[in-house]
Amino acid sequence: MTILAAFSSSRHSSAPLNLAIQIARTTGEPVIAAAVAERSWPPRDDPVEGEYLAYVRAQATQALQRAVAVLPVDLDVTSVVHESTSIPTGLIELADAHRVSAVSVGSSSSGMIGRVALGSVTERLVHTARVPVVFAPRGYAQTDGSIRRLTAAYGGEADVNGLIPATAELAGAWKAELRIVSFTVRNTAAFAGTIESSAEELVIQQWSRRTIAEITKQLNAIRDQIDVPDIDVVVGTGHDWNAAVQSIGWEAGDMLVLGSGAAAPSAQVFLGSAAGKILRRSPVPVMIAPSYRRG
């Protein structure tokens, strides 16, 4: 299998390439660094348009070659410039043609440095891809390390779509630690003066115990089918989504794994509403996994 890294020749961002290299150090897979040159559809026999497309391809090729030239030489990285009717369509075409295991993309230039933000290209990609899509936070730098821990965000329809067994299998294949987290937002300010803090804490503690029990039950159910590594189960709480996501602590080498929402067709990626809120607050790379069906 292969990792496909999307490269934007206009933005000149190497964050997706840097993340793809980090994953390749984890899995041993080769990397295809790809830029997509957009062409009209249906194709027209227009010399002016043909000349412009040739110029776009040449510019993309030069920018991509410069980006690949500074990547580590000990890894298998090839570059390709692909023509398609749109960037998302081109990436999906390449993913299908090369049977890739994941597509690495960057964040919108309008997002915060160090955070993940969807743009028009990635928004469409997460609703059409048939393989995992991994997002590099804006400005994600090159590292010599690998992915050392996967954190699966349990909750909502991700459970229905098999996030826990999918991430457990992935952690085993990547030889990474596995952490399962469930996030809850408690807007204590809205209840100021109407509920005692001790009562609020009791509610959170009871919810946490019930959530951990549900996760443990799912883990026990899949242990007979797959080899489940040692797992850390945690609960992230806060007065808003950002506080909840930051409350569990993050380290270099972490990756957050989100499951597809209930609207996801089988074996496709679809970002649910809660997952979207968590994604935008993540300080580490994020993988969105397709709806998982074992067997």
Image (cartoon, rainbow, N blue to C red):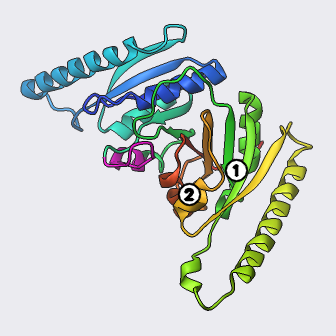
User: How far across and how far down the image is residue 152, in percent?
Assistant: 68, 48
Residue pushed farthest top? 73
Distance between mark 1 and mark 2 Cα atoms: 12 Å
Q: Residue at x 52, y 22 (%)?
A: 21
Question: Looking at the image, which is closer to me, 141 or 290?
Answer: 141
Residue pushed farthest left? 48
Left or right of 87: which side holds 170?
Answer: right
Which residue, given by chain and number where applicable, does mark 1 sit on?
Answer: 163
In this rendering, is residue 45 above or below 247?
Answer: above
Q: Which element carries disc 1, helix, strand or loop?
A: helix
User: How far across and how far down the image is residue 84, in percent?
Assistant: 31, 32
Question: Looking at the image, which is closer to me, 269 or 44?
Answer: 269
Under mark 1, the amino acid is Leu
Q: Which label belongs to residue 245?
A: none
Q: Quadrant of the C terminus?
A: top right
Under mark 2, the amino acid is Ala
Magenta stretch? 110-124
**Callout count:** 2
The prevailing secondary structure element of the residues shown in magenta is loop
Q: Residue at x 20, y 25 (%)?
A: 56
> Dot 1, how many residues are within 10 Å of its Cα: few (below 14), some (14-19), or many (20+)?
many
